[in-house]
Image (tube, rainbow, N blue to C red):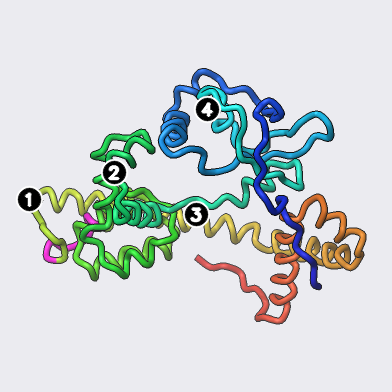
Amino acid sequence: MENSALLAFQDQVFTLPLSSIIPQRPLTPHVKNSQSYLQIKASVVEIGLIEPLVVFPQNDRGFLLLDGHLRLAILKELGATEAKSLIATDDESYTYNKRVNYIPPVAQHLMLLQALNRGVSEQRIAAALNVDISMVRQKARMLDGICDEVVELLRDRKLSPQVFTILRKMKPAIQIATAELMILRNDLSISFAKTRLALTPPDLLTSPTKSMRKQKADSAAAETLLEEDTETLVRNLKAIEASYGTDILTLTVACTYLEQLFQHQKVIRYLERHHPGSLGTLQSLVVEMRSSKRRIPFAPLRV
């Protein structure tokens, strides 16, 4: 079934007076003193508004603000009278926010290096981000000692930059193995990286400086953590096994109903107009369930 994609915004950026933009919520003093607010304010002061506001027209009553409450408050605080804005075709902020991409640490690092290579000073970057210059230098060195294969594996992953500090203590082969295991387990946490470091033999570390007693203590703690993790995994598998049959039956019935519902063009047009994101998700689910009927029947989980 082919469906035309609907535009979420009008195809140009407009300059609107701030007096015509209606925020959906007031900002508390706590928010205005937060780190995020201060960083955005420093960025606006240093280089101007980067991301336009997102608004939805309210007939003759101005524009409802969907995204950019901090930016709007900052612009007003700085004495601005107008702002670049995107005009949305839907009045749900969810439609916009669910399409905003998180910038992972590796991408942030590469963007920072690109700015430095283009001649932007560390002082200006620090001022724009409202951070100390030492933080800029630390972010610029984040991938020092990290092999290219690991950078590629973790390029699009959401994780703490401290993970790279831990990986740097391992030799390249162990870095790669650890990154692959973290992705396989879907666990990119600092604690798991520390566990892998503690279980790594000293000869596979870049500069083993811990005493043998300390190394043994860390290894014992790591093994205990892995045992607890294994027990939790087994409990989760048993819980899944208990409800697996019922869940699959419910999902199959629901998808069959949706498949029949999607045969009506009026339903499709309504969902395209009001809930395009949900429509795409439900259609993908129906297609996946339809293809699964041609596979080997589901087998019960065993632990």
Q: Which mark is residue 211?
A: 1
Q: Badge 2: how crowded within 10 Å, few (<14), some, or many (20+)?
A: some
Q: Position of residue 263 (x, y in %)?
A: 89, 68
Residues 182 and 26: in front is 26
Q: Tell me if residue 200 is in the magenta stretch.
A: yes
Q: Is residue 276 magenta?
A: no
Amino acid type, label 4: Ile
Depth check: give the residue in front, 140 or 271: 140
- Distance between mark 3 and mark 1 Cα atoms: 36 Å
Residues at marks 4 and 2, CA–CA distance in whole angstroms: 24 Å
Q: Is residue 277 left or right of residue 237?
A: right
Of badges 4 and 2, the one in the foreground is 4
The quarter of the picture where residue 289 lies is bottom right
Q: Which residue is mark 2?
A: 136
Q: What main secondary structure does the magenta stretch of the protein show?
A: helix
Q: Earlier in the sequence, mark 3 or mark 1?
A: 1
